[in-house]
């Protein structure tokens, strides 16, 4: 009997064991999912940092970023000084129906104006509403988590090391 | 109480059992199969762990349009679900539930030939799926219908033989009589018969692993492909009512029906518990085993089940005569 | 006319009517299904004549197996259900011959059993049938088993002669 029908009994055993264990289903709408750190949910814009250098719009493979800005002059603060010109953003749209969440815009931005946020529940009924404008992108900034802590035993980043070295020198 | 009232009350009770218990079995299948597959099954309908899922399904089916394909044989197509469903209701009339607080047996009608009546009713139910397969005007349903015909015909013989073995051991064809004559050692001497009856019954109901006629990867849904709405719900109810009839028959024939402590008062409860246990086995077999190929189905019936059933009859004859 | 006789006449009418429909319909599947109704009505007649065991065996064997076999054979010959059955030119000859056979058989049976009354009410049970079969009619029973065995062996021989083994 153990040679014949062994597979049959094994099948029954496996299914019964599964029956008695807790199921692995995540009860999503009632329980929020446990997202890993640095999860890519939505891109947030820190408007103050943006100089409309257009790097993100140029590098985006999907051409989903639309930027429009104009120059304003800031009068000179000192006597005989030069007037400064500053870029002011008029439009910064990200079209999430095109975005492929590749992170290139965030990696390429020299001024840290773009950040990842783990928020994912922004589905819309109309595809037009999937284009987030500047204000909405600023709102996402409040959901951007703090940078993840370094692994124990890791070396501190070069920027931090250079900053600390400069601080020591100036003392 | 007067005869007419008695008859009407019994009919109403049998109808109530027929409408409620298959739904309980269906919900058990949803939940047990889900947990065996490490998931949870329906959770939303009715609030508490989705207990009302099948009721919601019933409402959904009722409000659907029943379409008859143009190429279908209209009358055959439309009658098939009724022919598949009605025999199980009729079969439930003769299956006993057990003593009810000392008031005698709960049963629709205690027939002297109860066993034959139930087996005959189940064999008529075969025609329903067959009519569905033939009358759909669809190649896949046709092939499914051929598989149904071959499978159900092959498995009727071992089922009848295994049941005949128990009837011989009990000396009567009445289901109440068989349950009353049951002895605990029959669990051993009738064990091959129990296995043959259960496996043949699963194949009669076209339950996995014997659902080659309804193989959805190969035949869409076999004979049930063109059915939608209430007619499809009738076929599904027929499947679960069939599981109920099979479990009840297995319990009454091979597991002693209402045998157990205090069977005079709560015998009916013992029967229900055993019926649900056998139904759980049916569901367990569905989850654990892959589908048998059509030639494996036929060779299992003729090369394994029929010889074992005949051997069981021989053994029973020896035990009865000795 | 007692209620039993009225119901018997109804069942008999149903049997004859569905048999006629089975013969005259030009779709083979419908013919097989009318046969189911006929055999079921005959089983009903058996019940009314207190032969319960024979009635349920009739349903189990004829309706459950024989008709399924007939339909299976229909399906294997790949008949579309909408194609009508072939109509031979001998229809009327066959009808006349069938009528003659029916009248002849009917006359024989009626003249033989006319006036008989069914006694008692426990004669159609399995026990009484078993007693009769194994005490009074054992020899025909055994001969019938021999006939069935011959048919089975013949079927196996015929089906295997196609494949050389």
Image: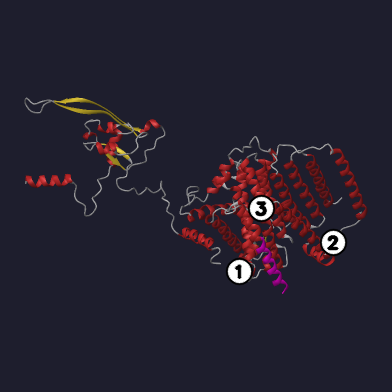
Mark 3 in CB contact with mark 1 (< 8 angstroms):
no
Q: Which residue is mark 1?
A: B262
Residue B194 is drawn in which quadrant?
bottom right
Q: Which residue is mark 2?
A: C120
Between label 2 and label 3, give the one nearer the viewer.
Answer: 3
- For the residue carrying disc 1, how many other residues have a C-alpha within 10 Å: few (<14), some (14-19), or many (20+)? few
Do marks 2 and 3 share a chain?
no
- Circle on res. B152: 3
**Most foreground residue, A57 or B277:** A57
Do marks 1 and 2 share a chain?
no
Label 1 residue SS: loop
Viewer can see residue A46: yes
**Residue B79 percent across, percent down from the top left:** 68, 43
- Quadrant in which the N terminus of chain B appears: bottom right
Majority secondary structure in the magenta region = helix
Q: Does label 3 or label 1 sit earlier along the sequence?
A: 3
Using the image, name the chain to which the residue with label 3 belongs: B
* B316 in the magenta segment: yes
Label 2 residue SS: loop
- For the residue carrying disc 2, how many other residues have a C-alpha within 10 Å: few (<14), some (14-19), or many (20+)? few
Q: Between marks 2 and 3, how big is the CA–CA gap?
A: 38 Å
Viewer can see residue B258: no
Q: Is residue B132 above or below residue B320?
A: above
Magenta residues (range): B306-322
- Circle on res. B128: none
Give left or right: position of C46 versus B313: right
**Residue A86 percent across, percent down from the top left:** 18, 28
Residue farthest to the bottom, as pictured: B322
Mark 1 in CB contact with mark 2 (< 8 angstroms):
no
Q: Between marks 3 and 1, how big is the CA–CA gap?
A: 39 Å
**Most foreground residue, A121 or C93:** C93
Mark 2 in CB contact with mark 3 (< 8 angstroms):
no
């Amino acid at each position: 009997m153990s040679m014949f029908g062994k597979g049959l009994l094994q099948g029954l055993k496996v299914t019964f064991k599964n029956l008695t264990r807790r199921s692995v289903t995540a009860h999503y709408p009632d329980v929020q999912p446990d997202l890993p750190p640095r999860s890519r949910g939505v891109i947030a814009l820190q408007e103050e940092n943006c100089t409309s250098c257009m790097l993100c719009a140029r590098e985006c493979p999907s051409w989903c970023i639309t930027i429009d800005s104009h120059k304003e002059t800031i009068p000179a603060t000192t006597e005989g000084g030069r007037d400064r010109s500053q870029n002011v953003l008029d439009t910064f749209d990200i079209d999430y129906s095109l975005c492929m969440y590749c992170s290139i815009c965030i990696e390429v931005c020299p001024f840290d104006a773009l950040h990842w946020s783990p928020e994912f529940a922004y589905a819309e009924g109309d595809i037009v509403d999937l284009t987030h404008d500047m204000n909405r992108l600023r709102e996402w900034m409040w959901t951007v988590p703090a940078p993840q802590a370094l692994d124990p035993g890791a070396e501190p980043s070069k920027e931090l090391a250079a900053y600390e070295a400069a601080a020591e020198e100036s003392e | 109480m007067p005869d007419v009232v008695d008859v009407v009350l019994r009919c109403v009770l049998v109808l109530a059992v027929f409408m409620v218990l298959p739904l309980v079995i269906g919900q058990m299948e949803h939940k047990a199969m889900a947990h065996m597959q490490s998931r949870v099954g329906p959770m939303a309908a009715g609030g508490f762990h989705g207990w009302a899922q099948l009721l919601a399904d019933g409402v959904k089916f009722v409000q659907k349009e029943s379409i008859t394909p143009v190429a279908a044989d209209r009358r055959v197509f439309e009658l098939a679900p009724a022919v598949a469903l009605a025999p199980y209701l009729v079969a439930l009339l003769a299956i006993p539930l057990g003593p009810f607080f000392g008031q005698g047996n709960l049963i629709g009608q205690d027939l002297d030939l109860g066993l034959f009546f139930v087996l005959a009713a189940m064999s008529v139910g075969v025609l329903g799926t067959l009519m569905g397969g033939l009358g759909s005007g669809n190649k896949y349903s046709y092939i499914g219908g051929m598989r149904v015909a071959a499978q159900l015909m092959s498995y009727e013989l071992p089922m009848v033989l295994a049941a005949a073995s128990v009837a011989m051991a009990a000396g009567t064809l009445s289901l109440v009589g068989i349950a009353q004559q049951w002895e605990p050692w029959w669990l051993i001497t009738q064990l091959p018969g129990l296995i043959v009856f259960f496996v043949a019954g699963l194949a009669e109901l076209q339950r996995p692993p014997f659902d080659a006629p309804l193989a959805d990867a190969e035949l869409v849904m076999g004979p049930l492909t063109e059915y939608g709405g209430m007619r499809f719900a009738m076929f599904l109810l027929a499947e679960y009512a069939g599981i109920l009839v099979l479990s009840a028959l297995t319990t009454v024939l091979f597991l002693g029906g209402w045998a157990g402590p205090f069977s005079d008062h709560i015998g009916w409860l013992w029967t229900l518990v055993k019926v649900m246990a056998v139904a759980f086995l049916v569901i367990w077999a569905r989850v654990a085993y892959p589908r048998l190929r059509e030639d494996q189905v036929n060779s299992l019936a003729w090369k394994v089940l029929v010889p074992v059933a005949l051997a069981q009859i021989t053994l029973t004859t020896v035990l009865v005569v000795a | 006319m007692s209620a039993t006789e009225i119901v018997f006449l109804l069942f008999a009418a149903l049997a004859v009517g569905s048999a006629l429909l089975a013969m005259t319909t030009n779709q083979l599947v419908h013919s097989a299904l009318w046969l189911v109704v006929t055999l079921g009505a005959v089983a009903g007649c058996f019940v009314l004549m207190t032969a319960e065991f024979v009635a349920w065996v009739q349903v189990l064997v004829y309706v459950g197996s024989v008709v399924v076999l007939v339909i299976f054979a229909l399906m294997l010959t790949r008949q579309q259900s909408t194609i009508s059955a072939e109509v031979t030119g001998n229809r009327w000859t066959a009808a006349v011959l069938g009528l003659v056979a029916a009248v002849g058989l009917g006359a024989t049976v009626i003249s033989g059993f006319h006036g008989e009354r069914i006694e008692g009410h426990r004669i159609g049970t399995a026990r009484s049938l078993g007693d009769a079969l194994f005490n009074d009619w054992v020899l025909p029973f055994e001969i019938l088993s021999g006939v069935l065995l011959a048919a089975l062996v013949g079927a196996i021989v015929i089906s295997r002669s196609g494949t050389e083994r």
